[in-house]
Amino acid sequence: MNRGFVVWLTGMSGAGKSTIAEGLRAELTALGLPPEVLDGDDVRTNLCKGLGFSKEDRDTNVRRIGYVARLLARQGTAVITAAISPYRDVRDELRASITGFVEVYVKCSLDELVQRDVKGLYRKALAGEIPHFTGVSDPYEPPLNPHVVVDTERETAAVSVERILQTLVRLGHVPGISAEQLGGAAERRRAARMPRLDVGLKEMADAYMLATGALSPLSGFIGREDYAAILEHGRLASGAPYTIPVCLRVDDVPSGDRVALHHRGQAVAIVDVRDLFETLPEREASAVYGTEDLAHPGVRALAGAGRYAVAGEVTLLPRPSSAFSEWDLTPREVRAAKRERGWATMVGFQTRNPVHRAHEYLQKVALEMVDGLLLHPLVGETKADDIPAAVRMRCYEALLANYYPATRTLLATNPAWMRYAGPKEAVFHALIRRNYGCTHFIVGRDHAGVGDYYDTYAAHRIFDQYAPGELGIEILRFEHAMWCRRCGAMVSPRTCPHPAEEHATLSGTRVRRLLAEGAPLPVEFTRPEVAAVLADAAHEELAEAAS
């Protein structure tokens, strides 16, 4: 039996709740999830007859709707409610008590509602002729953290329905369909008629992660309030921890309320434009990267990006095919795989390099504490001298096939691009892994570092800023690991008494030089199967360069 859920449409009279409810009913029915619709007016007539419009009576009306919705959802039914439900405390009460509660704020300005009102009720209320009229002589309290906001003053009912469906897919309430599939041919045709914005791999990756919930609580490119709060406090305007602004940067201001993002000639996403603001690249560089030095790859990328930022919710269209389709799992799919394996705990491991012995050591130490390992390599843009993602993926496959228990490991790609933001990116990566279902996350002392820009252990110390449980994931702070010749084993500074000259370490530069020379990599550095993959890739690169 499917799990039921409740889509709670709240908004002022005339905002369009009933219209959206009917459109959503048709779409869910077409998807094989025919819902029950509890319309506020119908419920008042048939279930709540005799109730007045005092706060107590309004609360009773909303609680009765919630009670029926909860019973239906328990039986696996999709439920849509369309009721003003003006008071926040009662809505929050229902949100806490109903599993699968999805709050949708149907937003519309009072001026627009007055213009729409053919019966003249708003004008009469404004003139004092109708007492207890919500939004005029009685309060309407908008939700503080709705799952989705639809603005019927700026978008059609069809667009609102599509955005609610995207949210339901992202939250896992529509089984058997992906966010990409939901985009559909009709949406792509509309995208072709929209203002077009050509984007690169970075923007495409951000759009995909926003739409699939990988960057939750964000579901769209950030606006100016969140941007300012991140730079000032390392948090969103709501106070939620967030250390890196996820911006859609442009040089030219796009026209229109909706913009289609195109990558290599294909529409990949649509952004509902909510805000447009000028960014502060120098201040952002200092706040995120701790430097304004253009030699830093993140600062250099920031300096070369557009000065303005477009904010808005993201609707994903089918993205271009990936070279790693077998491993391209969304957060929902990873969480489902975790449940299927019966893992209560799962540790995430971030890497942009081939897994070597030090990585393996850290992962297996963590596996002694948790049920499963999510090996989650970043496959978005990295520095030009990093090992290509395709080669790295072959290394991971070889390692997992030979040295890890299959029942306790899961390989999936992380489509993010590398910022090299050190401590700030360590937190960012932890939040991403939380969204993929990880309960634990491994952080090395120089996590996401580059050059000499970050102090030793800065990536560990930054987590001291957060209260226990605030990030929703437990951080495992690990020392640098290496092979000790005297110990004859992998060690860390915490476990080995021997001097540094007994430790076998290889820099990335030396690894690349050995590969270029055709020399074997030491077994103390990496497993033979991984070394063979790297050597083959180096030979292919040399042959291609010579041809």
Image (cartoon, helix red, strand yellow):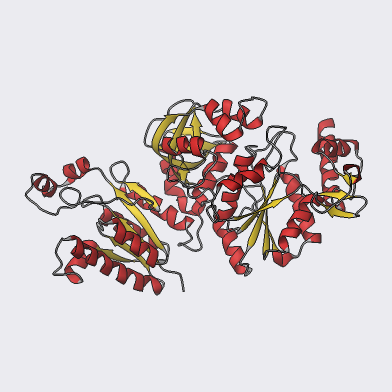
Question: Is residue 304 something that shows in the picture?
Answer: no
Q: Residue at position x 58%, y 56% from top? A: 473
In screen coordinates, is 237 left or right of 405? left
Question: Which one is in front, 205 or 265?
Answer: 205
Closest to the observer: 460 or 102?
460
Camera-nearest residue between 450 and 178: 450
Q: Is residue 213 visible?
A: yes
What x and y, as percent, mark residue 498? 89, 48
The quadrant where residue 110 appears: top left
Residue under the point 26% across and 69% down: 64
Q: Quadrant of residue 348?
A: bottom right
At 74% across and 56% down in the image, what residue appears?
A: 363
Query: Can you give x and y, in whole percent of width and height, for residue 257 in the image?
Result: 37, 36
Expressed as whole percent of the image width and height from the top left, the position of residue 261 reads: 49, 38
Q: Nearer the viewer, residue 1 or 132?
A: 132
* Residue 176, horizontal then vertical, whole percent: 51, 63
Q: Residue furthest front?
A: 497
Q: Is residue 41 above or below residue 393?
A: below
Please count the marks in the image.
Answer: 0
**On the picture, is 167 further left or further right than 266?**
left
* Quarter the C terminus occupies: top right
Q: Residue at x 61, y 32 (%)?
A: 290
